[in-house]
Structure formats: structure tokens, C-alpha cells
Amino acid sequence: MYAMNIANLLTGNEQNEAVLEITQSPHRLRFLTDALIAFTGGGLQPVIQQTELPLYQPHFVRADTVIDLQQQLSGFRLYLSVAGGFETDSFLNSCATDLTVQAGGFSGRKLKKGDLLNAIRKLNVQQKEWMQVLKSSNIRINHQLTANHTDVLRVFKNAEWEYLTNEAKQKITASPFTVTIQSNRMGYRLTGDALHTVPSCNIISSPVTQGTVQLTSSGELIVLMADAQTIGGYPRVLQIAGADLHILAQKKPGDRIQFKLIEFEEAEELLLTQKKQLHSLQQLIQKFYAH
């Protein structure tokens, strides 16, 4: 969400406008019209005729420009925003693609060679002016907004924390965990030291959300992600700070992470700080528009 918000701000869109999510494999995009675009996130390096396009910057691309995405970068998910937004199918008040039920996004499926993506609306006056500026000038946004590639994820205690054994409480923050191949947009399964609860830890299905860390009966952890369900029956031992969710979203199978325990109030402050950064970027962009 963080990378998506930034990409949209850089192109003058609303923060929740639909963007293209691109995971690690070769891709090639051809623009049929002049466009104002921005790439954020990580995983792949955008290239135009052997010239690398910096991430977290707005770019003007001319009609018939081809962008190749095959050079690997740190991270896992690259995001492309286009001024005017992508035209998508709506499902449950969202533009996201749900492959399980084949709904939303682009006919509910992954994109394939030859698919044509249209803009949903015409450019506003500011976006047109911004395109003209970028067409003639190599302007860069001087703002400290980049993908955070740390392995440390800040977490706070969740509802069933006290059910963990004392040994498990020590291990969960002292030992690293590895993202397994059995991970997807619904949840990341982690492998590491087995963790255990006291024998009486039986709970009924209870509310969960993105970032909830559940402990399975096998002693492994599952972190719920963007397509998480709404209730779950596994003990909820931790909750990832909202400001760090974008860090985990850039992890791929084989990557390692480490949990750092903080208080809920600190997690709240971190999220507020992140929102202030986005607001600051929005104000900076508006100043560029004004000139």
C-alpha cells in the first residue's frame, strides 16, 4: 500500500488509484500514447533502451516507448502508476485482482502478452502541466522515500501472546525466520525455531487482519497479508506494525526476517509518521505543479 500510495502521488493521482503490481519475472511494456508514470517498490529495474529509470521518481515517456523489466533488484514487487489511472473491473469495492474467484483487476486474471490496459480518465490540468515540465526537464524529486530493505519487522503483542511458553517468547524475537515457498498474497508462512503455547491454548475463530501473526499447531508462524481472511482459529501472538507491512511485502521466498518487539503506542506513532511523510510528498509535488 505504501509503494502504491507514493507511485500515485508522483503521477498526480489519488493515493488509492489502481496501479500495476509486477513480480519477479521478465516483462515488457509498450506505451501507445505519451504518459506520465512512476515506478516504486522493488524487484525489477525498469529500462528504456539500456537506460535505467530511477524508482520513486516521476517520468515522462513518449508514445511507442518500450520499457523492459528483467534486471533484478532487491525486493519482490514493483509498482507502476500511470497518470489517469488504470481502467479495471471492480470487485468488493476494490480494483485488486482476486485470482481465487477470478474477479477484479483485468478480468480477474494475470496479465498476458498482448493485453491492452486503458486509462480510466483523462489527465487533469496539473498532470498535463507536469508532463510538459518533465518532457523538457530532467527534474528529480528530492525526497527521502525509497523501499526499505531491512530484515527487521517491528511488532507488538497480540491477543494470545500470553499463551506462548516463556521459551517461545524468547525465541520469537531472538531467532530469525525464513519466508517459505508456501507463501502468497493471503499469507506468508515462516520457518524457524518451533514455537509452542501452553496446552490450554484453544480459541474459537476470532477477528484477524493484515499483519496478524498466527501460530499454527505445528509450531510455525503465518503472517496474514493483503488478501487475508477476516477470522482465524490459530492463536494471534503478534501484530506487525502497520508502518512495516510494506517491508514484509517486499520479501520473497528464501528471505529472512527478524521480529523486534515494541509497544502499541510506538507502532501507532510510526504509522502516523509514515502518513505525515506521504502528506509531505504530496505537498512537494503540488509545489512542482504550481511552477
Image: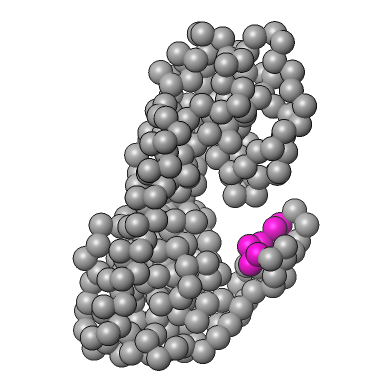
Q: Give percent across and percent down for residue 233.
A: 73, 29
Kindly identify the residue that appears in the image at 49 percent across and 56 percent down. 1
- Pick whichever, 206 or 90, lies toward us: 206
Q: 196 left or right of 91?
A: left
| 202 relative to 165, above or below | below
Name the residue located 44 percent from the left edge and 70 percent from the top edge. Answer: 8
Whole-percent x, y for residue 189 in the image:
59, 33
Locate residue 138, reporting x and y percent. 22, 79
Q: How is the image coloured?
A: one colour
Which residue is drawn at the image coordinates 23% and 86% (left, top)? 291
Asked whether residue 10 is in view, the answer is: yes
Q: Main secondary structure of the magenta part?
A: loop
Q: Magenta stretch?
A: 94-99
Q: Nearer the viewer, residue 204 or 246?
A: 204
Question: What residue do we see at 47% from left, 30% from top?
Answer: 156
289 or 45: nearer the viewer? 289
Residue 126 image-quadrant placement: bottom left
Give the x, y percent position of residue 238. 54, 29
Q: Is residue 96 magenta?
A: yes
Count every numbered label the image shows and give the total: 0
